[in-house]
Amino acid sequence: MADNQSVLSVSIVTPDGQVYNEQGDLLIVTTKSGQLGIMPNHVPVIASLEVEEARIKRGENEDEIAVNGGFLEFSGNVATIVADSAERQDDIDVNRAENARERAEATIKKAQEAHDADTLARAEVALRRAVNRINVAKH
């Protein structure tokens, strides 16, 4: 790629280690306030992330990472995402994600019937994570 002023350095880390570390032209994430696109020389940003994909455009290529919450910090053309968990598109086991979705849906149904708000909230997060992984894997 070109000089440091025209590219982003994007790193995604989780408690288990680094998931992604590449340079790109554009980073697109979904924050609690909505979708955010970051290009080189963007103003510094700190944002809380939703359970959603992160897309990194690199010329004609695009990398998709299933990011499950966390935070984004961007400054000096360096974007760092610290996430609870994250998976590269090629690393996602779709069958496992489908099973997780089914378990979460069943748990949601039981929690609604039992009026168990805590279990319902946890199951809804699990469902969002599973659906996110499925969506990223199928792109």
Image (cartoon, grey):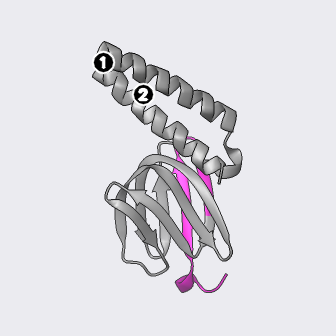
In this orientation, which residue lies closer to the viewer: 76 or 33?
A: 33
Give the residue number, with chain letter if any, for mark 2.
Answer: 123
**How far, Cα to Cα, is label 1 from label 2?**
11 Å
Secondary structure at numbered mark 2: helix
| Figure check: 57 above or below 90 | below
> Is residue 19 within the magenta segment?
yes
Q: Give the residue drawn at x 57%, y 76%.
A: 25
Viewer-nearest residue: 123 or 39: 123
Question: Where the N terminus falls, by quadrant?
Answer: bottom right
In terms of image quadrants, where is residue 16?
Answer: top right
Could you tell me how many numbered marks the image carries? 2
Q: Can residue 17 be seen at all in this image of the molecule?
A: no
Q: Quadrant of residue 107?
A: top left
What residue is drawn where x is 31% and y is 59%?
33
**Horizontal and vertical percent position of residue 27:** 51, 68
Where residue 80 sits: x, y (%)?
A: 48, 61
- Are discs 1 and 2 less than 8 Å apart at CB? no
As drawn, the label of residue 116 is 1
Identify the residue shown where x is 34% and y is 29%: 121
Q: Secondary structure at mark 1?
A: loop
Image point (34%, 15%), residue name: 113
Region in magenta:
1-21
Q: Position of residue 115 (x, y in %)?
A: 28, 17
Q: Report the front residue among 48 and 36.
A: 36
